[in-house]
Amino acid sequence: MIHNPFLNNILEKFNNLVNNSDLVSIKNNLHNIGLESLKKLDLVTKDEFELQTEILENLINKVHDLSLQLKQLEEKIIKLENNQ
């Protein structure tokens, strides 16, 4: 504990103020509102986020590869059409 009478007096007044039932009620209500708001958010854990990021990167790479394959097939079709 602090051995300064002035600071002790301020801390005592602060504790009395915080322990006031109205403030405790307001604090509890704000706490509950905050918890309810967090529950409504669509949050994921860091591990889930990293997994989703990895899956997304793999899908982006797959789409890129498929785009290249499609372009190559289109070029082959054009060559075949021009040869006929």
Image: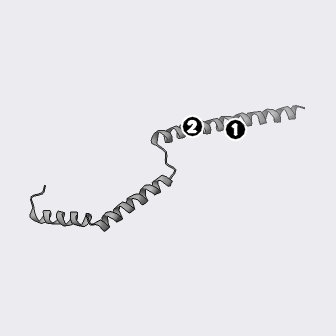
Disc 2 crowd, CA 10 A, few/some/many (<14, 14-19, 20+):
few
Label 2: which secondary element: helix
The numbered mark, 1 or 2, whose residue comes first in the sequence reads: 2
Count of numbered tags: 2
* Crowding near the residue tagged with mark 1, few <14, some 14–19, many ≥20 C-alpha atoms within 10 Å: few
| Point 26% across, 64% down: residue | 18
Element type at mark 1? helix
48 w.r.t. 31: above or below? above
Give the left or right position of residue 83, taking residue 71 as reference. Answer: right
* Residue indicated by mark 2: 55
Q: Which residue is mark 1?
A: 67
Give how far across and how far down residue 42 sits, in percent: 52, 50
Please tell me in which quadrant of the rendered image residue 32 appears. Answer: bottom left
Q: Amino acid at mark 1?
A: Ser
Q: Quadrant of residue 54?
A: top right
Please name the residue shown 46% across and 56% down the image.
36
Q: Nearer the viewer, residue 64 or 81?
A: 64
Residue in front for this viewpoint, 79 or 31: 31
> What colour scheme governs how the chains and residues are painted in the rendered image of this protein?
one colour
Mark number, residue 34: none
Which residue occupies the foreground of this view, 67 or 22?
A: 22
Measured as percent of width and height from the top left, residue 68 is found at 69, 35
Q: Is 76 placed left or right of 23 in the picture? A: right
- Residue 55 picture location, percent across and down: 57, 37
The image quadrant where one finds the C terminus is: top right
On the image, the x and y values in percent for residue 5 come to 9, 64
Picture residue at 43% right of the left edge, 55% below the top: 35
- Please say if 30 is above or below 74: below
Q: What's the residue at 13%, 62% (across, down)?
A: 8
